[in-house]
Amino acid sequence: MAATSLVLDRAEAAEYVVGDDLGWTIPPDGAATYASWASKHTLVVGDILVFKFEAGEQDLAFVTKEDLASCDTADTLHVFEKPTTIKFLGADTFYVTSTLAGHCSKGQKMAFDISPSSTFSTSPSPSADQESQLPLNFVTQISGIGF
């Protein structure tokens, strides 16, 4: 009975800024910074992650688990060169880092889980100018963001 009380469905998608005030950058406390951020958030299908960073000074790369562990960005799944907002349409574990030299090894990397949600539906879908499908399963880019 106690375990079932811990599971709460949200009626709406939540929006999170990755790294909170720090944003997406080389963290001052290394990789523990983003691991801690991810562990404090229960992310579910339909949630939105905002990756804030300065274009040209950072980027965002989706990679495999193995590539994240070794900080290998030679064969990324997808790279964003500008700040972006992403909605997650399916449950999975995602791995992100930066392709810029030394950023991953200095801690700009994160693994996070998107859990299923019984309240999320992908229809009706937004117009094509509002969302664009990415070459990743279960991810939709809502828009690029700027400062």
Image (tube, rainbow, N blue to C red):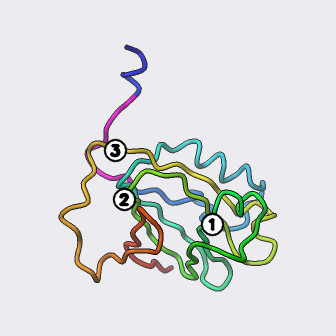
Q: Which mark is residue 89?
A: 2
Nearer to me, 121 or 36 = 121
Residue 125 point in image, percent of width and height: 22, 68
Direction from residue 17 to residue 107 in the image, left or right: right
| Residue in the image at 44% along x and 74% along y | 134
- Label 3, on which residue? 117
**In which image quadrant can residue 124 be found?**
bottom left
Q: In x, y percent, where is residue 138?
A: 41, 61
Residue 10 within the magenta-colored segment of the rendering? yes
The segment highlighted magenta reads: 7-14
* Amino acid type, residue under disc 3 in the picture: Ser
Crowd class of label 2 (few under 14; some 14 to 19; many from 20; radius 10 Å): many
Q: Are marks 3 and 1 in contact (CB under 8 Å)?
A: no
Q: Is residue 45 magenta?
A: no
Q: Image point 43% across, 50% down: which residue?
A: 91
> Circle 3: is it few (<14), some (14-19), or many (20+) Cα within 10 Å?
many
Real-space Cα separation, disc 2 to disc 3, in angstroms: 10 Å
Would you name the residue on which mark 1 appears? 63
Closest to the camera, between mark 3 and mark 1, is 1
Q: Main secondary structure of the magenta part?
A: loop
In which quadrant of the rendered view does residue 18 lie? bottom right
Instruction: Say if 73 sits above or below 66 in the image.
Output: below
